[in-house]
Image (cartoon, rainbow, N blue to C red):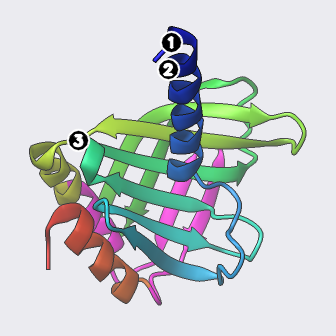
């Protein structure tokens, strides 16, 4: 296969992978609240949708490529420039924090937080030890990025989280 065709095929696959792993807008049919999608490639995405127009929080696990991702969209953080930012999820005394990048969507006037972590089974275990106490709490979850905070309810998370844990973290 000529090098130019291989390059075009690689670029097409790369673009499809980026869009498949980072959904920003709510999909048609997304309802407000917590939900999960899974696929046969051992990928699971846990979503929180406050309204029908955006997925505020996406936590994704791509077991087939040993990757863990957290994505938050539609933000107005008060941080003026693109660059490094920290996302914190907390509930009661439980807390999970991760450093990622913040990018500005000039057209929408909002920002997006994104982090992709190389995560084999051992690393997923470490992530689970810090993240699950937050997600399994009976208290509301606080999502913080920069100066902005959102309160996410835990009502409705049990069933989607159960499916997510089985695929992503190997927990029952």
Which quadrant holds the C terminus? bottom left
Q: Is residue 95 above or below residue 102?
A: below
In the orientation shown, which residue stands out farthest toward the left? 122
Q: Is residue 7 magenta?
A: no
Along the line of sight, which residue is nearer the eye, 105 or 66?
66
In this rendering, would 163 be left or right of 46? left
Along the line of sight, which residue is nearer the eye, 21 or 68?
21
Label 2 close to label 3 by CB (< 8 Å): no
In this rendering, would 27 be left or right of 114? right
Mark nearer the viewer, 3 or 1:
1
The residue tagged 3 is 119
Identified at 44% across, 75% down, the residue is 36
Along the line of sight, which residue is nearer the eye, 149 or 22?
22
**Where is residue 115 drawn, in percent x and y?**
46, 38
Can residue 146 be seen by looking at this rendering?
no
Mark nearer the viewer, 2 or 1:
1
In the orientation shown, which residue stands out farthest toward the right? 107
Q: Could you tell me which secondary element the residue under label 2 belongs to?
A: helix
Quadrant position of residue 95: bottom left
The residue tagged 2 is 6
The residue tagged 1 is 2
What is the spatial separation of the Cα atoms under label 2 and label 3, in whole angstroms? 28 Å
**Where is residue 152 drawn, in percent x and y?**
54, 73
State which region is magenta.
130-156
Total label count?
3
Mark nearer the viewer, 2 or 3:
2
Identified at 52% across, 36% down, the residue is 13
In the orientation shown, which residue stands out farthest toward the top? 3
Q: Is residue 162 above or below residue 73?
A: below
Can residue 67 be seen by looking at this rendering?
yes
Q: Could you tell me which secondary element the residue under label 1 belongs to?
A: loop
């Amino acid at each position: 296969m000529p090098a130019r065709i291989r390059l075009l095929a690689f670029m097409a696959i790369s673009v499809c992978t980026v869009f498949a792993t980072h959904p920003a807008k709510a999909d048609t049919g997304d309802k407000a609240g917590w939900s999960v999608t899974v696929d046969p490639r051992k990928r699971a995405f846990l979503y929180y949708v406050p309204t029908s127009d955006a997925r505020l929080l996406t936590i994704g696990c791509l077991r087939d490529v040993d990757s863990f991702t957290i994505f938050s969209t539609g933000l107005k953080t008060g941080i003026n420039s693109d660059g490094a930012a920290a996302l914190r999820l907390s509930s009661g005394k439980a807390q999970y924090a991760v450093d990622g990048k913040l990018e500005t969507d000039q057209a929408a006037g909002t920002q997006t937080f994104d982090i992709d972590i190389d995560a084999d089974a051992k690393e997923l275990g470490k992530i689970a030890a810090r993240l699950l106490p937050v997600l399994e709490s009976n208290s509301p979850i606080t999502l913080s990025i920069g100066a902005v905070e959102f309160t996410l309810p835990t009502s409705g998370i049990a069933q989607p989280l159960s499916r997510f844990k089985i695929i992503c973290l190997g927990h029952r």
